[in-house]
């Protein structure tokens, strides 16, 4: 399948999403996965970023102006998703364990299982919207600002909510006299 065929499939509504992702993985999956793995140093993170890269490619393929630059565009998307993962998910703390027990031979299965199915429509929509910054040639401009809540652990909010609730209760009880 040529790059033009792949782009046509990406841009075509009737082509089933699972088939398009499988074709992209066949054509570019190995090199994109290696790119993500080199950038992140973590197999699990590389799977996630590869999956998100393919979701962004499907959602924003109409932005690519030059059909002959599909491979370059996919690498730029992967690089942007790697940056987003490093900045917004890991923040200042990369994972302590950077080696997964899973082998690289499962990349296709893990990526496709993580992106197909109607129950993942919301996730795919979220990834597509979050990656909405492109130049006039269709190349990504970078990850943009992180969502503060995405970077902050829920464990930080629980004590804060409890403390504020306690303070409000004290104010209410002392003001009721």
Image: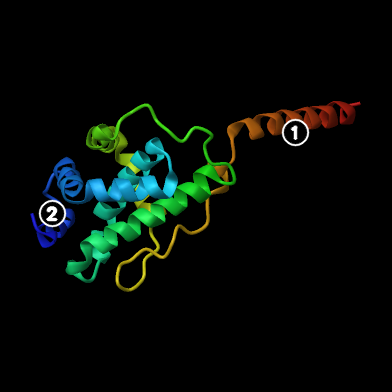
**Which of these two is toward me, 159 or 44?**
44
Task: Report crowding for label 2: few under 14, some 14 to 19, many 20 or more residues within 10 A (C-alpha).
Answer: many
Q: Nearer the viewer, residue 57 or 101?
A: 101
Of discs 2 and 1, which sits in the foreground? 2
Mark 2 secondary-structure assignment: helix
Residue at the bottom extreme of this rendering:
136
User: Can residue 149 be seen here?
Assistant: yes
Q: Nearer the viewer, residue 15 or 93?
A: 93
- Which residue is painted at 38% across and 53% down in the image? 129
Residue 21, position in %: x, y? 20, 45
Q: Quadrant of residue 138?
A: bottom left
Residue 83 picture location, percent across and down: 45, 53
Q: Position of residue 37 (x, y in %)?
A: 37, 45
Q: Secondary structure at mark 1?
A: helix
Residue 92: horizontal and vertical position, in percent?
A: 59, 46
Say which quadrant the C terminus sits in: top right
Name the quarter where the N terminus is drawn.
Answer: bottom left
- Separation of disc 2 and disc 1 at Cα? 52 Å
Seen in the picture, residue 114 relative to 143 is either above or below; the reply is: above
Residue at the (40%, 52%) spot, across then down: 81
The residue that label 2 is drawn on is: 9
* Mark nearer the N terminus (2 vs 1): 2
């Amino acid at each position: 399948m040529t790059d033009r065929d792949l782009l046509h499939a990406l841009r075509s509504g009737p082509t089933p999403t699972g088939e398009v992702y499988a074709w992209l993985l066949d054509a570019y999956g190995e090199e994109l996965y290696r790119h993500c793995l080199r950038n992140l140093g973590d197999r699990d993170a590389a799977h996630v970023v590869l999956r998100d890269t393919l979701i962004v490619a499907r959602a924003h393929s109409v932005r690519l102006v030059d059909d002959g630059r599909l491979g370059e565009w996919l690498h730029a998307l992967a690089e942007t998703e790697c940056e987003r993962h490093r900045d917004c998910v890991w923040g200042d703390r990369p994972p302590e364990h950077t080696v997964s027990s899973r082998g690289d031979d499962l990349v296709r299965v893990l990526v496709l299982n993580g992106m197909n199915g109607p129950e993942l429509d919301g996730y795919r929509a979220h990834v597509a919207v979050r990656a909405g910054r492109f130049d006039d040639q269709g190349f990504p401009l970078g990850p943009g600002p992180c969502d503060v809540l995405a970077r902050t652990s829920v464990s930080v909010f629980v004590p804060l909510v409890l403390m504020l609730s306690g303070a409000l209760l004290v104010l209410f009880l002392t003001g009721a006299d």
